[in-house]
Amino acid sequence: MPVLCSCCAEKRAVLKRPKTGHSLCKECFFCAFEEEVNQTIVSAKLFKPGERVGIAASGGKDSTVLAHVMKLLNERYNYGLELMLLSVDEGITGYRDDSLETVKRNEQQYELPLTIVSYEELYGWTMDAIVKQVGLKNNCTFCGVFRRQALDRGAIMLKVDKICTGHNADDVAETVLMNVLRGDIARLRRCTAISTASEGEAVVPRCKPLKYAYEKEIVLYAYFKKLDYFSTECIYSPNAYRGYARTFLKDLESVRSSSIIDIIHSGENLSVREGVKMPVQGTCNRCGYISSQTLCKSCVLLEGLNRGLPKLGIGKHNRLHHKILSRQPLSEKEERKLKSAEF
Ligand code: SF4
């Protein structure tokens, strides 16, 4: 006996919503998903009419659904936004080059202008070259730090007021877990925020319209809408720390379906005890980007790469940063330590 949609009670249900357990037909699922994203945007006041908004587009399911839904809601509810796509080319052969082809098709499909900024142009290094030097253990640290800054640089170039990213509920819950596991209080406090304010001229405010959308529902939405997206994993991802947090989260979810939203709520409600020392934000002496140190992480990582000292920006080498940047000679032991690609 076919199950009827629990919303319209007319059409046959084609899926059971992972978030609510309701059996829905395609149209009612689309409607519920889009309306929830609209509610997230409206209740958090993510945008103002007339704003230029850059959609961070990787060609993956999250950013493709984000671009599709942002365009649709902007028209349906007259948000009055000027939308554009912004992509970062990390220089990963066999992964990013293929996914960027998808973004280029999305540019046509959604009639949104696309800008691509690349690591090679901005830093003189591709991720392929970085992995050759640093190996596969800490490559994602380089990639994540460079991407954050690359997006900001692209956004400043495009003069956008905000960047929206495709981070979904699973991503936010994973980040909460990772920050707990690392004991990173400063990031733990920030990571559940749905939007970040501008932290100086070099940083454009960011927001996450899909913050409460479950990954499983994003996949279902993309599948039933037949969206054109790229689904291959990054070839350098197997060792990413996030991967372990993701597996752990999936295990938790299999025994308790509300785990994702519960972890997000826990993160939102954590408060930091008075007196806990927080990093003070300043600007990088070299490039002007926000930093709590004399040099931002990106400049330190780059310096390490350019000098053949890949460990420079990894771990606690602040004393050595100072030595290197003020051109003081390193001891043999220090040099050996920083040269080793084995972290
Ligand atoms: Fe970059 Fe790591 Fe993500 Fe690959 S998995 S795109 S190397 S951060």
Image (cartoon, rainbow, N blue to C red):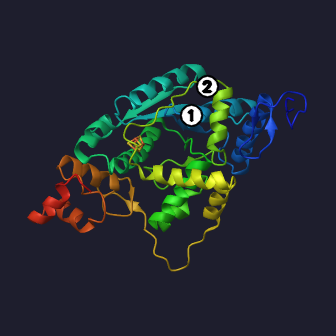
**Please, is residue 184 above or below residue 255 in the view?**
below
Residue linked to disc 1: 61
Task: Report the number of discs.
Answer: 2
- Compare residues 110 and 51 and report the one nearer the observer: 110
Element type at mark 1: helix
Which residue appears at 46% of the width and 71% of the height? Answer: 278
| Location of ligand 1 given as a quarter of the image | top left
The amino acid sitting under disc 2 is Leu
Residue linked to disc 2: 227
| Image position, residue 89 (x, y; %) | 39, 33
Instruction: Give the label on residue 159, or none.
Output: none
Which residue appears at 58% of the width and 53% of the height? Answer: 251
Is residue 198 visible in the rendered structure shown here?
no
Q: In which quarter of the image is the N terminus?
A: top right
Which residue appears at 31% of the width and 34% of the height? Answer: 121
Of pointers 2 and 1, the one earlier in the residue sequence:
1
Question: Picture quarter containing residue 229?
Answer: top right
> Is 119 positioned to the left or the right of 204 in the image?
left
- Compare residues 21 and 100 and report the one nearer the observer: 21
Q: In which quarter of the image is the C terminus?
A: bottom left
Question: Picture quarter containing residue 293?
Answer: bottom left
- Compare residues 65 and 22 and report the one nearer the observer: 22
| Image position, residue 117 (x, y; %) | 39, 34
Is residue 149 visible in the rendered structure shown here?
yes
Element type at mark 2: loop
The residue lying furthest to the front in this view is 1
